[in-house]
Amino acid sequence: MGYLRQKQYICTKFLLFAMDKISVIINTYNAARHLPQVLAAVRQFDEVVVCDMESTDNTCDIAREAGCRVITFVKGDCCIVEPARQYAIDAAQHEWVLVVDADEIVTDALRHFLYDTIRRTDAPAGIAIPRKNYFMGRLLHSCYPDYILRFFRKNAVHWPPIIHTSPQVNGRVEYIPAHRRELAFEHLANDSVSDILRKTNTYSDYELPRRRHKNYGVGALLGRPFFRFFKSYVLKKGFLDGIPGLVHALLDAVYQTVIVAKLLEERTTGIEPREE
């Protein structure tokens, strides 16, 4: 009987140990610019899986040299990452998954926090993590805490293949307090105005299918951009960021203008945007 108890105890400890492991998932496409720094920040996790969408640069070489497991998602004509999210999550070996973009840094404090959390008896099914965003070299008040749901149990999540959608987590989700800035992702992108305008045209095309049921008119063409500017510049205190805050708020308004304008164009002409 003592032997059976000891065996049961060992098996239980083994299962608990296995449950305490975290897989990091990084989706990539021509991500060589920041990838070495990103991989260095996650090297102490239990597994790092790089899900590459047919990069034409040396992204995969960098990942393999860092000891990552590299898998390929055939992107075809797709220019967004969301269709590859669930594919990458399914490839993870461990119960807990942390999804990191190829231009985001995971701090040591965040890593310790996540491991401490999953060891709790009341651990949530998912954790929303704040992110620090930069523009014109400045940390933006208007883009913080910018919560993103990127940590969850593998078997409790579904990520729809639709642009700008969040994963659907079956269970309780906790939010890291915004004042815990040491636990936030560091977003290295620091996009230029040209980058943002280019993404505005591409991303707005992918936004259209989920907004075609909206009966947008002149009111939306004026109101949505105005509200987005007001939210970014006033409600989220973008005015504290000087010129970068003002420009970023205006670009937020432009994004809304483009979406509504393209929907109105479709309705007027009956022609959907051409695929590049």
Image (cartoon, rainbow, N blue to C red):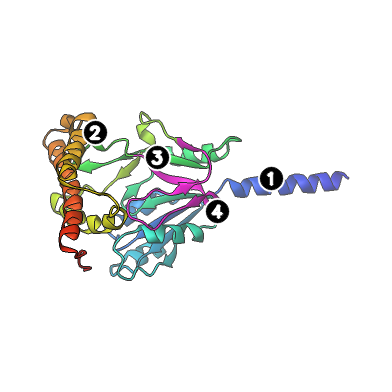
Residue 53 is situated, as x and y percent measured from the top left of the image, at 35, 66
Viewer-nearest of labels 4 and 1? 4
Q: Earlier in the sequence, mark 2 or mark 1?
A: 1
Q: Earlier in the sequence, mark 4 or mark 1?
A: 1
In the picture, measured across the screen, residue 200 lies left or right of residue 42, that is left
Tag 4 secondary structure = loop
- Label 4, label 1: how far apart the Cα atoms are: 16 Å
Viewer-nearest of labels 2 and 1? 2
| Above/below status of 252 relative to 154 | above
Tag 1 secondary structure = helix
Does the stretch in magenta take in 148? Answer: yes
| Above/below status of 154 relative to 247 | below
The amino acid type found where label 2 is placed reads: His
Residue 17 is situated, as x and y percent measured from the top left of the image, at 62, 46
Label 3 crowd (10 A; few <14 / some 14-19 / many >=20)? many
Mark 4 touching mark 1, by CB under 8 A? Answer: no
Q: Earlier in the sequence, mark 3 or mark 2?
A: 3
**Residue on which the image places disc 1:** 13
x 31%, y 65%: residue: 78
Q: Is residue 196 visible?
A: no
- Label 2, label 1: how far apart the Cα atoms are: 45 Å
Q: Which disc number belongs to residue 141?
A: 2
- Label 1, label 3: how far apart the Cα atoms are: 29 Å
Viewer-nearest of labels 1 and 3? 3
Viewer-nearest of labels 3 and 4? 3
**Residue on which the image places disc 4:** 94
| Above/below status of 148 relative to 240 | below
Does the stretch in magenta take in 143? Answer: no
**Residue on which the image places disc 3:** 129
Q: Which residues are magenta?
A: 147-174
